[in-house]
Amino acid sequence: MRSGDRIGGDVKRAEQDLMAAKAAAVKPAGLTVPQYSALLALSEHPGAPAAELARLCLVTPQTMTTILQNLVALDLVARTPHQWQRNVLENRLTEAGYAKFREADKGAVAVEQKLADAFTDEERTQLRTLLQRFSEVLGSSYRTRE
């Protein structure tokens, strides 16, 4: 199969373009895309432990630990022991974290809106269906090798 006929390259290019646009959008708030993703996840799931945040943000637990350490150092996230499970740390946005998230989210939402506006409702549904199938095909073939 010639390289120009491979779907993977198209998906990778689209993903890189999206990440570059998001990076530019959240940079004025002083955040990286992974940091923004963690703040977004925490805004929707206050108190989530690092392992859950890693799943939500599609990164490894080790990567999420580093992201959280950086966000704590910036005073954007506070980590406290869980009320009943002392070996589990809950993660919550600080006041500064909420403010930084809202600032960055304006740019990220603008990127998402620009993307959404480029497609009709039907096309967005079709694109999501096709991407879901893409993930299912690769996910099932990967899982069968484990």
Image (cartoon, grey):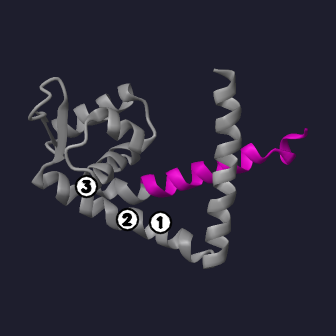
How many marks do you count on the picture? Answer: 3
Judge left or right: residue 138 versus residue 24.
Answer: right
Rendered residue at 66%/30% (across/down): 142
Question: Which quadrant holds residue 75?
Answer: top left
**Label 1 amino acid?**
Val
Rendered residue at 68%/67% (across/down): 126
**Label 3 amino acid?**
Ser
Q: Is residue 125 above or below residue 100?
A: below
Q: Position of residue 83 (x, y in %)?
A: 8, 35
- Return the residue at label 2: 107
Q: Secondary structure at mark 2?
A: helix
Main secondary-structure element of the magenta-colored stretch? helix
Q: Given the current orientation, which residue lies at the most extreme top position?
A: 146
Q: Secondary structure at mark 1?
A: helix
**Label 2 amino acid?**
Gly
User: Which quarter of the rendering shows the N terminus?
Assistant: top right
Q: Is residue 92 above or below residue 139?
A: below
Label placed on residue 111: 1
Q: Secondary structure at mark 3?
A: helix
In this view, the residue in front, 27 or 8, is 8
Residue contact between numbered discs 1 and 2, judged by CB atoms under 8 Å: yes
Q: Given the current orientation, which residue lies at the most extreme right position?
A: 1
**Mark 1 or 3, closer to the camera:** 3
- Return the residue at label 3: 43
Question: Which quadrant holds residue 69?
Answer: top left
Please state the extent of the stretch shown in magenta in the rendering: 1-23
Q: Is residue 53 above or below residue 27?
A: above
Label 1 vs 3, first from the N-terminus? 3
Rendered residue at 46%/40% (across/down): 58
